[in-house]
Amino acid sequence: MKNNTVVVVYDKEGRIVHVYDWSTFEGTKLPTEHQMQNEAIEIAVRATGRPRSEFAALHTQAEHLLKGVEYRVDVEKKVLVGENRLRRP
């Protein structure tokens, strides 16, 4: 894979409602950030039935997301915050 970008869709309280992972292969290009954001938010709208105005999105790289960590978004700073590690059964 050449590129791996993640769009995180969150609500006004910073709860993550959708994570969209974009990957490309050699010879292909990623859509623009605006296109990726619009598509990710549209998927969240369809999945939740909530209006588009309730969501915002931010972009990050997949390698910045640690497995087993629960995230939220600090809506003022517009950054991901790792809350705690998820427990495994």
Image: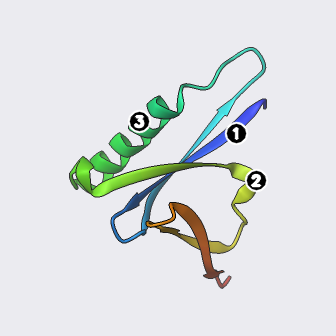
Q: Which mark is residue 4?
A: 1
Give SS at disc 1: strand
Find the distance from the CA under tag 2 to the CA under tag 1.
9 Å
Please identify the quadrant where the C terminus is shown: bottom right
Q: Is residue 46 left or right of residue 59?
A: left
Circle 2 crowding by C-alpha within 10 Å: few under 14, some 14–19, many from 20: few
Q: Which residue bears the numbered disc 3?
A: 39
- Against 12, residue 50 (above or below) is above
Choose the circle earlier in sequence order: 3 or 2: 3
- Against 49, residue 35 (above or below) is above
Where is residue 73? Give x, y as percent: 50, 67
Q: Are marks 1 and 3 in contact (CB under 8 Å)?
A: no
Residue for point 51% across, 65% down = 77
Q: Which mark is residue 63?
A: 2
Q: Amino acid at mark 2?
A: Glu
Where is residue 61? Give x, y as percent: 69, 48
Find the distance from the CA under tag 3 to the CA under tag 2.
21 Å
Q: Is residue 42 left or right of residue 5?
A: left
Find the distance from the CA under tag 1 to the CA under tag 3.
16 Å
Give SS at disc 3: helix
Where is residue 47? Give x, y as percent: 32, 51
Q: Are marks 2 and 1 in contact (CB under 8 Å)?
A: yes
Task: Compare residues 14 and 19 and report the one nearer the observer.
Answer: 14
Circle 3 crowding by C-alpha within 10 Å: few under 14, some 14–19, many from 20: few
Residue for point 37% across, 45% down = 41
Q: Amino acid at mark 3?
A: Glu
Residue that extends furthest to the front in the rendered view of this protein: 77
Where is residue 14? Give x, y as percent: 42, 68
Q: Amino acid at mark 1?
A: Asn
